Amino acid sequence: MSTDTIAAIATAVNNNGISIIRISGQDAIMVADKIFQTKKGDKKLTSVQSHTVHYGYIKDQEVIIDEVLVVIMKAPNTYTREDVVEIDCHGGIVVTKKVLEAVVKNGARLAEPGEFTKRAFLNGRIDLSQAEAVSDIINAKNSYALKNSLNQLKGNVYKKIEELRSSILHDLAYLEAGLDDPEHIDLGDFKNVLYGNIGTYKKDIQKLLDTVNNGRLIKEGVKTVILGKPNAGKSSLLNALMGTERAIVTDIPGTTRDTLEETLMIGELCLNIVDTAGIRSTSDIVESMGVNRARLVSEESDLILYVVDASAPLDENDDDIINMIQDRNAVILLNKSDLEPAVTVKEMRERTGKEVLLISAKEREGLEELEEYLKGMYFKGMLEYNDEVYITNLRQEEALRMSLESLCMVQQTIEDDMPEDLYAVDMMNSYEALGRITGEQVDEDLINTIFKEFCMGK
């Protein structure tokens, strides 16, 4: 691990009230001391106590750059477990960069994305799941995502995984001892005990895997696809929900040829909305490509908003869409409710078995009812949230599935009355797979890949 001194701007680079430049490494305090001067010029940062704040100026070759507060934090009680200095300066873009330049000129180097958190992980302050939680906190889209990330940062995922690893390792140690000393340790009765223990571990892992879907919805939002025939009002609905003209709206059928994606927050509910081409049979090659893409994204969606022109009778294209959404989570929106109806709520409920709402995207009628229904649909029904651990990370999910698969192999090997040394191989695979979650069993390339996704200054 690199032990040199790193620095970066830890706040957004724009005209804020203040900016923070973070420095970490064995020479962090010395670097800061070279460019810091108190009002009286009577204090050296290298001699002050840890976790203290000091008022003064940052200078570059005796020219004062800014008036600042400097926070001194000495190892090991810091974010990185190294000496850390934070310089609080005025938040202008120019002054912030000049302070950073002075830091770099006097012995620090620019930090890579996520390097501060990477050092916290490599120095043993946090495990890998906690490090990933830092990024999730920054990118949280709602209070549920924030709360889950904070729980993970507190070590909730780590504790559950380490409990599992400890139990598996205990059984593995007994098994290895029996293989090494069969005269004194009889593994005959242990097979049944091990089989039962493996069943318990599998249930614990499956319980974590059962949180994946909710965890993904909490973290990433609900992938929502707007479907319907051409001119049903799909783009008008998107514009009405967004409160801006994001999609082109005309009276010409087939205007939307490609998908258009937007993110909409309805209270705490995050919808990743995809507006699609109108579903119909067409000989137009470009429009046909758009229709095929609409079908594809609908298959990958969490929620479908099926927009129906309530002023026109249903036809074979509607039959096609109804078949598409039959086994999907969908809400039917009877649009153009301000016009004479040709389709009723009762008729659509009977045809689809789905919830049907009346709206007028053009007049912005029924949108509040739609938003309230969607919030209730997720936060009072499908998307349950409590203080349990939620797995929101694909890497963690894959590791859990690998561990579960290896445990299933152990049970199968016992059922097939295979040699005990085969149990040990699969148990070790399960143990190591869980270690990938906490960072006990990961290589340097994976670590670098994970932390490159972080922002500068973290």
Image (cartoon, grey):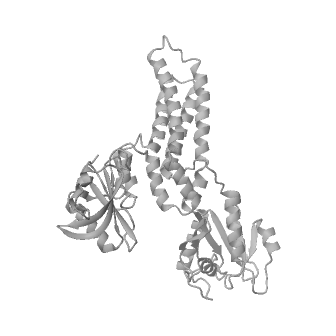
Residue furthest out toward the bottom: 251
Q: Can residue 13 be seen at all in this image of the molecule?
A: yes
Q: Nearer the viewer, residue 278 or 243?
A: 243
Describe residue 426's horizontal placement relative to residue 235 as left or right: left
Q: Is residue 328 visible?
A: no
Instruction: Count up the numbered dots.
Output: 0
Residue 141 pos. (x, y %): 54, 63
Q: Position of residue 29 (x, y in %)?
A: 26, 53
Residue positioned 49% across, 57% down in the render? 137
Q: Looking at this view, name the residue that lies furthest to the top.
A: 183
Q: Is residue 330 left or right of residue 14?
A: right
Residue 299, percent from left and from top: 60, 63
Quarter holding the C terminus is bottom left
Residue 217 falls in which quadrant of the image?
bottom right
- Residue 297 image offset from top left, x and y in percent: 57, 67
State the residue at coordinates (55%, 75%).
Answer: 290
What residue sits 25% from the left and 50% below the top?
Answer: 47
Q: Is residue 230 left or right of residue 427?
A: right
Looking at the image, which is closer to me, 439 or 186? 439
